[in-house]
Image (cartoon, grey):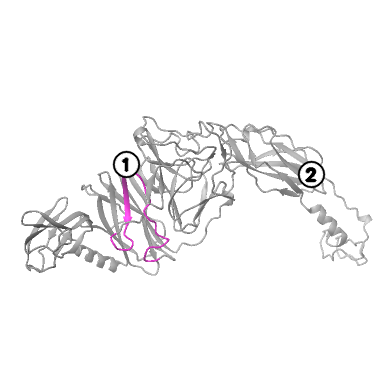
Amino acid sequence: MRKFRTNNKPSAFSLKALVFLFFPLFINAQEFNIISQQVTLSQSPMTSDSLILNGSIGNNYREVDSGDTLFLKSGLWNIASGIFSSPPMINASFPDTINRYAKDVYAQAIVYDMNGVQNVELKVQIGGSVDQLTIPMEAIDDSTYRVDLHDSLRSVLNFRAKIVTIDGMFNESNTSFSAPHLQFANDELTMRDSIYSHYPDGIPSGKWRLFSFPGDLDSMYLPPSNLDEGHVFYDWDRINKNWYKPDSMKIGKAYWFKHNYAESVIFSNKDVSGYAVPLEEYVIELNQGANMVGSPFSFPVQAVLSDGVKGPFRYGSEEGEGWEDVDGFEPWAGYAVYSNSDTGTITLKPFTDSIVVNRFLNEGWRLELDVSSDGYIDRIGAIGRKEGALERRDIHDLPSVPSLGNSLRLLMDIESDGTFDHCSDIRSLEEFNGVWNMQIQKNGFQGDVEMTGSIKDPLPADLRFGLIDIMNRRLIQDFPGNGILIKDQDVAIHDLILIAGEESYVNQMIDQIFSDIPEEYSLGQNYPNPFNPTTQMEIALPVTERISLSIYNLLGQKVVTLYTGEMKYGYHTMRWNGMDQFGRPVSSGVYFSELRTKSFRKTKKMLLLK
């Protein structure tokens, strides 16, 4: 197993047709005769037609029951038969690295066997194929066999091979698979691969895309980039949680790329050679948080994610810009995965014979939530309950995955503290009833949004759902059977509440939630009034949006801003301590409180008496 690393091996290659010469194989079976007249019979009377052999040390090899079978079990005969039934011994040699234009590259085997060697073959499996090719190995002497690793094997797909031999008694031996670092030439590895590439037509203009390089290039240098000059690369800084422009690439990592050229951009190793990594398990070690990763293999592979790792998630498709949950890793594509610790790993499996399928029963239920708009998608949202999960934030929940550019997101408030920063909220099976607070967030665009749900695990028979559209004060009772269409109302945030549980609980919570949603904006009169030095006022917001609440004097001068920023829908109590913006007490007199939103403005008069 090879750990994730950056190799400094050499370079590239093109895909060629595989041409092999197969030679006729002739097998000469060996006769094995036992002449009964030459064997001393037991002195015991025979009870059947069986033949009982007496060994040279004087005892019967085996007491025989009735039947017409010859039994050979003990003594010197057992020793001899054990030798002749042993499979061949193979001492194999296979190159660790194969250069693209190297001559006389061989796989070799030295085979030892008492029965004589019937045939020796090289079994070859090309990357991306489930079939194995058989190539006969040529005998150099009585025990040495060799086969040329032909140019047709040397492609960006790489290959793995093992040696299989059969002796004169049809006993079979085989080695484990070996796989080389295989050099490919300049311009052999290209994104324009109609069979395996995720981007066979290249990366389109004006779109943010995650991509990775499916090979280990001799030079991973990235020149300075700027979108104003044509294109740009970005990487995610997990510590500072911001974007930066990398100066080099690493194998197994993915990078954000955008360009404004007229034609799609197709990556290849045009000016640099490189190596196809060996076709064996490839481990990518993860950092805690979001990781941008890619496969080093030039054909699709499956992966095993360690505990606490979620994904892979791919960004952007023909259906829109945004994240979606996918299976497997394709060459040239980039993916986001989330790890709950610095010990998380992804193990890429180039061949499915090494994948172990989990066969445990998943206790619980899961409702996957998708949102889409014209040109934007988010398909990684989910709620549910699961064995081992908690009611609060834990490893079963997926935090928001970072992305660039305009976006559509469905986010959860897991801790009920007004922070919407998770894509999924999976809770404990110890509870049955629950309320999930969600927001659809639109960044940089306007348009209608549709939300749909799909159930991935069997639901408890008495589980019911209720979905409340806060802004429009409406109840969607048949969700997820039917989706919900939210008409564009020129707002960036749209609040939803999903209730799941017993029918009586769902109905009770629906009534309570509607009573907590104001029907209109309002700014209440402060109390006490007059006041000295502290007073408070109530505000009501029917939707979550950006507001400002300020205090002015009689001259219209702003004294202090009590709050500015986004505030959740509902009823809120705000306080003023009679101080200005510099923390100085203001004088007695008449003041005005003012509440402003995008579509609402209200003032109230108040009196400070000292």
Quickly name the residue at label 2.
Answer: 117
Residue 96 vs 47, above or below: the answer is above
Which residue is situated farthest in the top direction here? 262
Residue 414 is covered by the magenta coloring: yes
Residue 256 seen in the figure:
yes
Rate crowding at label 1 as few (under 14), some (14 to 19) or many (20 or more) other CA atoms within 10 Å: some
| Callout 1: SS | loop
Q: Is residue 139 left or right of residue 373?
A: right
Which residue occupies 81% across, 45% down? 116
Q: Quadrant of the C terminus?
A: bottom left
For residue 525, above or below residue 332: below
Q: Say which quarter of the image contains residue 392.
A: bottom left
Separation of residues labelled 2 and 1 (CA atoms)? 65 Å
User: SS class of the residue under badge 2?
Assistant: strand
Name the main secondary structure of what is drawn in magenta. loop
Q: Which amino acid type corresponds to the residue marked 1 in the rendered image?
A: Gly
Report the front residue among 563 and 63: 563
Which residue is painted at 82% across and 64% down in the image?
Answer: 66
Q: What range is drawn magenta here?
A: 390-418
Q: Is residue 588 left or right of residue 260?
A: left
Query: Whole-percent x and y of residue 276?
Result: 57, 40
